[in-house]
Image (spheres, helix red, strand yellow):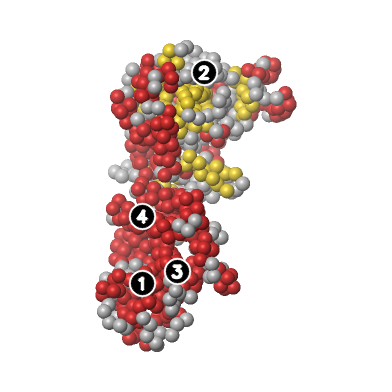
Amino acid sequence: MTVEELLEGYSHDYSWDEMMEKTMLRSHYQPLFQKLADLDFSTISQLHQQASEMFMSQGITFTVYSDDAGIERIFPFDIIPRIITAKEWQHVEAGIKQRLKALNMFLHDIYHDQQILKDNIVPSWLIASCPHFTREVFGIDVPNNIYVHISGIDLIRGDNGTFYILEDNLRTPSGVSYMLENREVTKRLFPDLVNTSQVRMVNNYPLLLHSILQSLSPRPVRDPVAVILTPGIYNSAYYEHTFLARQMGIPLVEGRDLVVNNHKVYMKTTRGHQQVDVIYRRVDDEFLDPITFNSGSILGVAGLIGAYRKGNVAIVNAIGNGVADDKAVYAYVPAMIRYYLNEEPILPNVPTYLMTDEGSREYVFNNIEQMVLKRTNQSGGYGMLMGNKASEKEVEEFRLKVEENPREFIAQPIIKLSTVPCFLDGRIQSRHVDLRPYALCGPSGMHIVPGGLTRVALKQGSLVVNSSQGGGSKDTWVIDQ
Amino acid sequence: MLSRSADALFWISRYIERSEGLLRILHTTYVLSLDRGPYANNSWKTILEIFSYLPKAEKAELEKDADQILEHILMDSRNANSLRIILTKARENARGMQDHLTKEVWEQVNFMYHMMYDHQLSSQLKTNQQIPAIERLLKNCLLFTGIVDSTMSRGMSWNFMNLGKYLERCLMTIDLMEQQMIDNDLSEEKDILYWRGVLFSLSGYEFHLKNYRSNEANDNVIHQVVINDSFPHSVMYCLQRIRKYLDNIIEENSPEDPAGLKRQFGRICSSVEFADVQMIRGRGAPAFLKQTGNHLREFAWALSQTYFSYS
């Protein structure tokens, strides 16, 4: 089979296609498609089948709850890797580093002097009205002044291939295990290609994370105790928690395994209580400590915030980070970069309209067919209105909600995400994608894993990539070209 | 090690050991039920007594239909001791313990779980492929044992897993033997055909033929199943293994009252170790087994109080 036959019928409705430039294959995709053309469709189908079986047998699944019965699904995986060139990556990496540096400084500022509010760069009312601005941690000093140890920054590519920042995830971003497992599966499917393409390594992520956790220990001991705190097996990201615990060789604990005594955190072991120094928590802020936050929660540990305030335990990520990844605060990140770093942002934001502003509100609803409306405090593709798909009635209902609570909404122009080739229904088709690179930040600096998780909107024409909304994922290669 | 982890590891092994026992008893009973022999008529009763909580009348009704029993014991989600439920529980525990298990062990438990929900199994059971289906499941239990043995490090996880495994095995041997003898008068000598089911179920038939030459089948079987410590399913063998792993655990974890647990277990052990067949039969073998089983269950409870209480 020739490459032309392989790609017969491939179209990419006016979006930026990462593989095709008009009718030409971009050079960095050529070896991959030459290889695929050497196989035939039935062999590619077999590889696709093999990949699904690998995920199932390893238990790499997430749980979908419907009718009270949890159903286990694999996160759909597309076998064709997405390729990013070294040059593109260099730009992305620099942009993310700059952004995280500013966001980290913002978090320190907002929980200490609040200089940025006093200088009127970010309006005070915006922060005061943010549900994730956590007054309980005001004034707490965190080790090395690092708030964002682990982050996932969502990027998209617009019409002309420009990378935009879509969203910052600074609390408990998930998906990194899929990034790592996707690569392992690809290695089995295309060992020769991974080898010859000089794909940059991702699998040192757990080791880097482990060394960061260790370095944050408040107790100056040789072998500090770091743990992962999980909400338990019913959490949809539970697989990832076990994966990271295993890859780092540290205990996976639940709230009921921990106890706080005299402002120190201990875990209950068969040998009695053992002190814990660092907690990588995958439990949201509001469930961490029933004494300080949600008193009905049994996922956390009573007294944890007290121990944190005393500096007896490090918590990763810091508590209260939600104020920096609020979708309305997002609009001010470029201003933060200019304010704290005196630099121009390397990666642009998607233009964002705050619905609290009457003028913007009017503009947005006059041009609704080009807009997407989002709730500031929701993620996972919930609470969204795509202006070009919604009926008049839906728009009207949304308008009422917006007018009632303008702080809870923002609007952005709909950006046609870039497309990449996927193997679906036995042939190669284009689908829209985003990119979530993972960044680790410790006392010795910042490290961004080359690549990240590419999420695919598997429905034709769909721009929503979230796994809860029928999205899948791809292995993402950064190659030295 | 976290108390919760110790608890889960202990139970993963117990559940898989229970599955293995269940499958072996099921296999034996099914095969023997195809023979018309002097002892075939009460054969399904034992398995229902051990692995089902149904009321007496329903059990009696079920006993007439082998396929329904198979369905009830293997697949019935309402039966808390069905294979499907046991393996689901084992897998649930393993899912929470992936940081203590090797990847290979987890994948095997996960595979066994998926087998139970796979249509291949249900269609085999419906199309007269019952024996191959049971054998395939049994193979996978054995595979689990092998994978654990060759991949797990010999640390605390290993100790707790083995403790669970041999405790379960010991209790299963006791229950099975007790059921076999409970309604039968042992004063008359039974022949080997009478004991064949128990011996097959404990994987000890060939062992018996090789090691016991005399015709006193009752005495011989009691000796093999209770006292003979070279038979890996005997009560004595299991107790010896439990003692070893218990010692390791106590040594590593120094509970508040190590002597208490040791004393309690030592009493059970010596009551078997220093018994002989005449004494056991003199007291009544079913009563002897029942008492040992009860003491062992009390011991398991004390063990969980010491090491597993966390919530």
Q: Are marks 2 and 3 in contact (CB under 8 Å)?
A: no
Say what amino acid the circle numbered 4 marks: Phe
Measure the C-alpha gap from mark 4 to mark 1: 23 Å
Name the N-terminal-most of marks 3 and 4: 3
State the residue position of label 3: B34
* Disc ID at residue B144: 4
Between B2 and A38, the one lying in front of the other is A38
Q: Which mark is residue A12?
A: 2
| Residues packed near mark 1 inside 10 Å, few (<14), some (14 to 19) or many (20 plus) | many
Q: Of helix, strand and loop, which one carries label 2?
A: loop
Q: Amino acid at mark 1?
A: Leu
Quarter of the image with the N terminus of chain A is top left
The secondary element bearing badge 1 is classed as helix
Among the two numbered marks 1 and 3 on one chain, the one whose residue lies closer to the N terminus = 3
Q: Residue at x 41, y 15 (%)?
A: A25
Residue at the spot x=49%, y=56% of the render? Answer: B127
Chain for mark 2? A
What residue is shown with label 1?
A: B199
Q: Where residue A258 sits in the image (x, y, percent)?
A: 45, 51
